[in-house]
Image (spheres, helix red, strand yellow):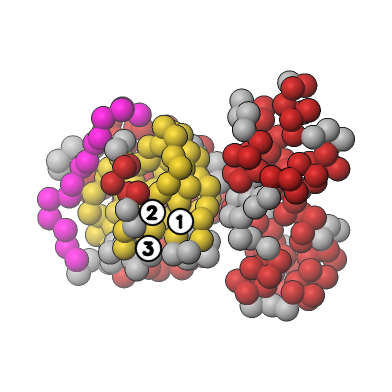
Amino acid sequence: MKKKNICNIVESVDKTSNLSIINLVLETMPEQYKKRKLASTYSVNYVTSGFAKITVNQTTYFIEKGDVFFVIPGMSYCFADSLNFNFAYVSFLGNRAQKLLERFKINRNNFIFKKVTEIDEFWKLCFLSATNTNTDIISESVLLYTLASIEKRTISPLKTTSKKTELCENVKNFIDNNFANTDLTVDYLSKTFLYNVKYLSTTFKQVFGIGVVEYLTKVRLSYAVTLIEQGFTSIKDIAFMCGFHDQLYFSKVFKKKYGLSPKQYLNKI
């Protein structure tokens, strides 16, 4: 996408409409977001380059190129520790906006979706096609296409599933999308899904044959390997980006899994 800031504004916003598009923006000057903002509209955001930490209320997450994150009215957020960080977004309002997010189970606990890179070309095309007269239509297309792409990840062939299986699949999807959150633990999942920790852990292992903690660690370590292979060299940064609070603990579990410390693995490549 282009490097300079682009903002396409819908000239007349009907706030009584079921879905009103406000603007379509390519944000290449995100410094203004270092100060905490209180969202007054919905927005779907696509990270076009770099990475950053986003703090929502009191929790910090890691987002990078290819990730999609949603902002919900009343959400307090800011960015920090960014590098070459740019993002594009569509902001919107209306009764249908809330219903769309409810349909796709997007909320304050589930608003980041990792590596939705299949939408990249469509977003680029829409920015190239947007004019003063079609921004509302183009922007709505971006929103709906992005939601449809996210939904594809969670759709499986029609089958009868038990409540236990459905619960565990939801927990697994939540981990896949939020593993970089350093606060994500079994207790966190328990509070999010409103189930007892022991029940959640036992049921997850019955369904997938692996414990919740073990699965979370597996996902985080797999992503650590990806970051190393992509050229990241700071073990401290890699640990944080994968959701580990403690660099030493990260190195310990990494070596247990792969037989090499992160530094040794890095030197091997």
Q: Secondary structure at mark 2?
A: strand
The amino acid type found where label 3 is placed reads Ser
Q: Type of residue at label 2?
A: Cys
164 in relation to 155, above or below: below
* Mark 2 to mark 3 CA distance (whole Å): 7 Å
Could you tell which of marks 1 and 2 lies nearer the N-terminus? Answer: 1
Provide the residue designation for mark 3: 76
Q: Count neighbours of disc 1 (C-alpha within 10 A) and say few if under 14, some if 14 to 19, many if 20 or more.
A: some
Q: Which residues are magenta?
A: 1-15
Q: Is residue 195 something that shows in the picture?
A: yes
Quadrant for the N terminus in the image: top left
Q: CA distance from mark 1 to mark 3?
A: 8 Å
The answer to whether residue 265 is magenta is no
Displayed quadrant of residue 132: top left
Residue at 37% over, 63% down? 76
Residue 104 position in % (x across, y down): 50, 62
Q: Residue at x 69, y 45 (%)?
A: 247
Marks 1 and 3, the one that precedes in the sequence: 1
**In the image shown, does 14 or 199 lie closer to the viewer?**
199
Residue highlighted by disc 2: 78
The answer, for residue 119, to whether it is visible in the render is no
Q: Position of residue 103 (x, y in %)?
A: 48, 66
Q: Kindly state the secondary structure of the residue where label 1 is placed.
A: strand
Left or right placement of residue 55 versus residue 197 in this view = left
Principal secondary structure, stretch drawn in magenta: loop
Q: Identify the residue at image location x=12%, y=55%.
A: 12
Task: Return the residue at label 1.
Answer: 55
Say which quarter of the image contains residue 131.
top left
